[in-house]
Amino acid sequence: MTPDLVTFGETMLRLSPPAGERLETATELDFRTAGAESNVAIAAARLGTDACWLSKLPDSALGRRVTNEVQTHGVDPRIAWCASSRQGTYYIEQGAAPRPTTVIYDRTDAAITTAEPDDLDCGAIRNADVFYTSGITPALSETLEATTAELLADAQSAGTTTAFDLNYRGKLWSPAEAKETCESLFSDVDILVVAERDIRHVLDREGDARALAGGLVDDFGFETVIVTRGDEGALALNDGTVYDQPAFETETVDAIGTGDAFVGAYLSRHIAGDTVGDALCYAAATAALKRTIEGDLAVVTPAEVERVLENRGGGITR
């Protein structure tokens, strides 16, 4: 089967102590999976989109743990299995004011860092409606930087819509490194998702959200730029029209993965043929639901999203 959405990137195992526990004193850890690109695929699949996730994993119990969970949520994992590499992990200690949340990565030399186009089902990318990856992927190795560039260019040549979330991670690279690499990819990106803070801090641009989106469209020719603004919601610029979407009120249980839920929902509705404004509103509602759920994954249903939309209203177009 040809998937409508194909994503590519690393998925790690997420290990976390119970709320209020410190990693250094914990006697048990919660065991989940987490990765931007598989998170996006899972959110989209749970909302009715045929989704596939491409990656490279160790042929081990830990690698199979990852694919088993991804499959549980309706995503087709197409994996390059590697006999000798390792599975990336990260540890998260949830904070409570004034103590911040702490994340420790253990992903050096993970199998994904050696992934090349020949390892992957590039035919699925060429035949998909949308191909998605994020700025996390090229940050992981020089090999992945080259692979990401080739996959995006190949998708563009085939007529597949390309979506890219800058998704800056300061523990992986510097703002200057991220700017140079991501801007080199932008010519092959149709839909850019980027946090307002990252436009300022990484892309070194100033102005309000509307001006920031407009500058990126003018300079790089994106079809759509979506600027995420945390509690202030999101703004999208498409074909000269600005869509201003407030955030939905939510009680936060776990904020990690909120952005991925937003992107997965937006791409799901984009593939279904929604307008930019309607897709943006649906994405904001899905993101609000994700914040009520422990773990990185948006374990939601279309009916739940629809209920949020019915109760809260939509966005603003101007």
Image: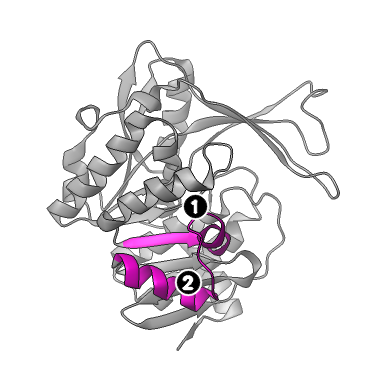
Q: Is residue 37 above or below residue 157?
A: above
Q: What is the secondary structure assignment of the residue under circle 1?
A: helix
Inspect the image, locate mark 1, and give the three-letter code of the amino acid beneath it: Asp
- The reply to whether residue 73 is visible in this rendering is no
Front disc: 2 or 1: 2
The span shown in magenta is: 191-220
Q: Is residue 83 above or below residue 127?
A: above
Q: Is residue 235 left or right of residue 82?
A: right
Label 1 CA crowd tier, 10 Å (few <14, some 14–19, many 20+): many
Tell me the chief SS of the magenta region: helix
User: Dividing the picture into quarters, in which one does residue 242 lie?
Assistant: bottom left
Label 2 CA crowd tier, 10 Å (few <14, some 14–19, many 20+): some
In which quadrant of the rendered image does the N terminus lie? top left
Q: Residue at x 38, y 61 (%)?
A: 192
Task: Please name the residue that numbered disc 2 is placed on.
Answer: 212
Q: Position of residue 304 (x, y in %)?
A: 54, 63
In which quadrant of the rendered image does the C terminus lie? bottom left
Question: Considering depth in this image, is 203 or 39 the residue closer to the camera?
Answer: 203
Indicate which disc residue 260 carries. Answer: 1
Q: Position of residue 134 (x, y in %)?
A: 41, 47
